[in-house]
Amino acid sequence: MEVYHSQRFNPEELALLGRAIGTISHGTIIVGRDGRAISRYGKRAMVVGIVSTGSTIMDVRLIPLVALKDFAHRKGLPLAYVYYYGGVRVYVSGLDTEEISTILESRSFIEAHPNDIGATVYYPNALDDFLHEVFKHYNFQINGKALVDAMNTPAVLFFPRMSDHFGFEVELINDMMTSYLPPKPKEVFLHKLQKGDYDFGLRFRPDGIVEFYRDGEEVEFGSMWKLLDHMKRNL
């Protein structure tokens, strides 16, 4: 769930948010980001706040949010993800968002002793490991061509590995994951999908939801595993 949105880059606010997240996480939390520089710096500010409470960080760096949700779920750990979409946003999962808001308002943060400041563990291969697990589990083939709207998110990193493994062609749009320009609207994607020679379409939203399109059907998924289960049954 989204817990933060600001049109401006405010590292002080993100550090305070991190202190609130760390106060309630009581352990390890996975953090990631999208491809913009502002998200990289925003994540750093948030991490400073989290480790100040004594909580430990597993930093997976650049990764699509939908993949991070699955990755964190399998690890049994909460997550916090910094991304840019009409401003700086923070998405969390596995944490009580109302409790985060309450702690932010009251400023009742845990303050760790200098000896107890949290550690940061870097895990830059999280996406590679996630895809390896997916490809080990799914080995079906898809014939045809897909239109994929990456919406200027790190979902571009799924390709060409995913299309190569499952055997389908891909045409990407909105594939500039470092751009601050808004992606072309959904109507452009739908018009292109309808007029072009495509067998299905995928639209990766910044909030970690994937939209699947085929024969006039639109289905939403918050997990790559559930998306691939659907594709296996229907393609």
Image: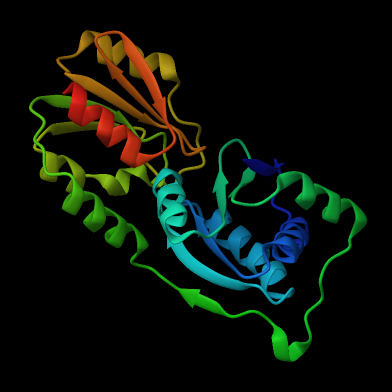
Give left or right: position of 82 versus 206: right
Image quarter where the C terminus lies is top left
Screen quadrant of the N terminus = top right
Residue nearest the observer in this picture, 172 or 51:
51
- Of residues 198 and 103, the one drawn nearer to the viewer in this rendering: 103
Asked whether, in this view, residue 59 is left or right of residue 22, the answer is left
x 26%, y 9%: residue? 194
Q: Residue at x 76, y 52 (%)?
A: 100
Query: Does 83 sit above or below residue 182?
Result: below
Q: How far across and down, in percent of the image, does residue 103 sit?
A: 84, 55
Measuring from the top left, give residue 82's x and y in whole percent.
57, 52
The quarter of the displayed image where residue 150 is located: top left
- Which residue is located at x 63 percent, y 44 percent? 89
Residue 175 visible in the shown view? no
Where in the figure is residue 102, as x and y percent of width and height? Answer: 85, 50
The residue shown at (23%, 8%) is: 195
Q: Is residue 189 above or below residue 206?
A: above
Is residue 132 shown above or below 152?
below
Residue 40 spot, x, y in % from top left:
54, 60
